[in-house]
Image (tube, helix red, strand yellow):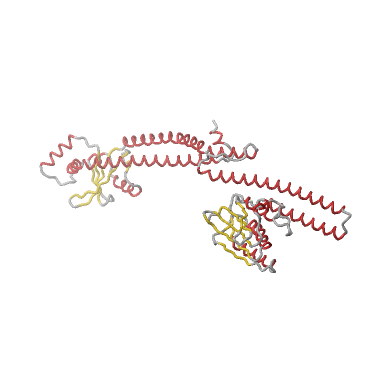
Amino acid sequence: MRLIPILFSKQPRLQRRLMLTSLAIITVASLALAEVINQQKVQDFYVNQTNDIIARLPSIATELRLEGMLPKSNEVLESDASDHARRASDYLLITCVNGMRDHYTSSVEARRRGLQDSCDRVRQLARDTSPPYMVTLADSQLYAVVPMPVSINNKEYDLLVLRNAEQVQKRLDSARRATYFRVGLFIPLSGLLLVSAGYWGLRPLRRLSEEVKGILSGEREQLSQGYPSELDEVTKALNELISQEKHQRQTYQHAMKDLAHSLKTRLAATNAIMEDANLNESQRQQEMLSQLGQMDQIIQYQLRRAVSGRQGLTREQVSIAPTLEQLTAMLDKVYREKQVRVDLQLEEEARFPGNQDDLMEMMGNLLENAYRFAISQVRIRASVEDDTLTIIVEDDGPGIEPKMREAVLERGVRADRRNPGQGIGLAVVHDIVLGYGGTMTIEESPLQGAAIVLRFEAPKPA
């Protein structure tokens, strides 16, 4: 059976900790409950004894009269005395004066047994404990004592009613042992049930552990479904992290392959330039610098592509307005001769669900294109509706023909070949958008130019 090795394994285990802690709690609670039950039985004995004494008050009064502690009356005394004589008394009476501090008077039987110091013993017992009182008196016998305040001939007394408690104590001890015996059976049974319940309850965690091991060994690609609701969010997050890691690994591989292919082409072109005898030294240097510039742009693009869109398990939230204000201020200086008019329509709650650098790279490429192709106006809108963040960058330039709108999202394709560039700006933006699970479309703007529309799942307010 696997339960015993699990509980007594030296390796720290969550299940063993839970089982041992729970078992300790059950043990302490059971022992405390057993003690409460035993105390309740003692209290029940005391209550029953007190009720019995109250029911026997007439008999007690008769004995007090016989002892001379109550004034003798008419013929009632004789009938009470004869009745009392017919019944053997199972209690002793001791009357203490001055709150059990001074003199006492007692029944003949109490004097015969030598219980003269009973008032003092009960007084000390009452000072240290609470009822019920069980005390061993001078005759070495255990008595159950019930103190009762009485008033006789306008004098206050403390009447002690004593009953032999040897048998009662034996019954209480027997009941106490029976209670602890039941607790002794209950604790291991509870422990067994607890271990079984814990083993069954922690099965999803063991299943999760096995599936994670399978993913690490390459036997599985993702965690399965059907976990309890408490683990559902955890498994979803792990699956998302695994998917992102796989996507990122593929992105790195593709980027490196594309980089190698692109550089190979540029190096071949460089060799051709070096061997071209028709070029003079100035032309050769110009062509070489052009090829080196293209290599630098390709390397930067592939590196950006390899790291863009990485989100992990945590979701960042970046305010859009400061980034756009910074970019437009910079581009206004670069294109100050064109005097481009910029219209920012940004909602306060519009926040980008990702990294600040990715937002800067994405919007920098879009705005640089918009400024370059615009005639006199650029408009940027950012809004949130139905949990969707929409960012639109528009210009009043020549726009992009419908047949070219899909192609320009691919690396190296430019809509306007008259303008310088390698055609990688929109491809970088598209890669970033896809990395964040968004969409990118190219439409016609009411300004008569191009409208680049980006849509993302809006981040929830922090």
- Is 105 on the left-hand or right-hand side of 268? left
Point out the residue furthest to the left here. Answer: 75
83 left or right of 139 in image: left
Q: Position of residue 90 (x, y in %)?
A: 24, 37
Q: Position of residue 277 (x, y in %)?
A: 89, 54
Q: Quadrant of the N terminus?
A: top right
Q: Is residue 190 toward the left or the right of residue 438 in the image?
A: left
Q: Tell me residue 361's x, y (percent).
A: 66, 57
Q: Is residue 149 above or below residue 27?
A: below
Seen in the picture, residue 88 relative to 329 is either above or below; the reply is above
- Side of 130 relative to 341 (left or right): left
Residue at 64% over, 46% down? 245
188, 200: nearer the viewer: 200
Which of 441 and 118 lies nearest the eye of the viewer?
A: 441
Seen from the viewer's position, the closer of residues 154 and 290 is: 290
Residue 18 x, y percent position in the rendering: 51, 41
Name of the residue lying farthest toward the right? 277
